[in-house]
Image (cartoon, rainbow, N blue to C red):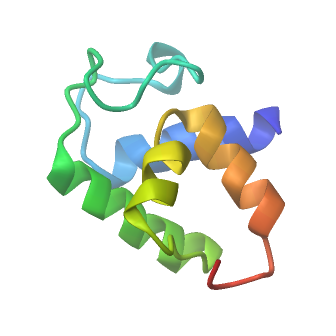
Amino acid sequence: METLITDLKTQIIDHLNLEGVSPNDIDADEPLFGSELGLDSIDALEIIVMLERIYGLKIKSQEEGKKVFYSVRTLAEFISENKGLGVV
């Protein structure tokens, strides 16, 4: 799980072009949105596209998305639980 969390941090930094941010700067349990990262709804869409492209996973509802996108750890848990399932 820790390897996946580190990978996700790196992917988020790369996909969102977060300059000056390293994986160590992102707390896996901090909220992704409303935190010092300053992510917004456009960033959420970018992360959704990243999930689909890299992991083949889709979020089926806005309610599920709120839970999944809470933190890097919740993203990692979602990926671990749904790997290989495709649309969830």
52 left or right, relative to 82 = left
**Residue 18: x and y, percent?**
26, 36
Front residue of 41/61: it is 61
Where 57 falls versus 11 (above or below)?
Answer: below
**Residue 87: x and y, percent?**
62, 84
Res 20 quadrant in image: top left
> Which residue is most to the bottom?
86
26 left or right, relative to 85 = left
Residue depicted at 27% across the width and 62% down the height? 45
Residue depicted at 42% across the width and 46% down the height? 12
Res 39 quadrant in image: top left
Front residue of 54/58: it is 58
Where 87 falls versus 15 (above or below)?
Answer: below
Res 2 quadrant in image: top right
**Residue 19: x and y, percent?**
23, 31
Residue depicted at 45% across the width and 69% down the height? 61
Residue depicted at 81% across the width and 59% down the height? 81
19 left or right, relative to 64 = left
Where 50 falls versus 17 (above or below)?
Answer: below
Where 51 falls versus 13 (above or below)?
Answer: below
| Count of labels in the image | 0
Quadrant, the N terminus: top right
Quadrant, the C terminus: bottom right
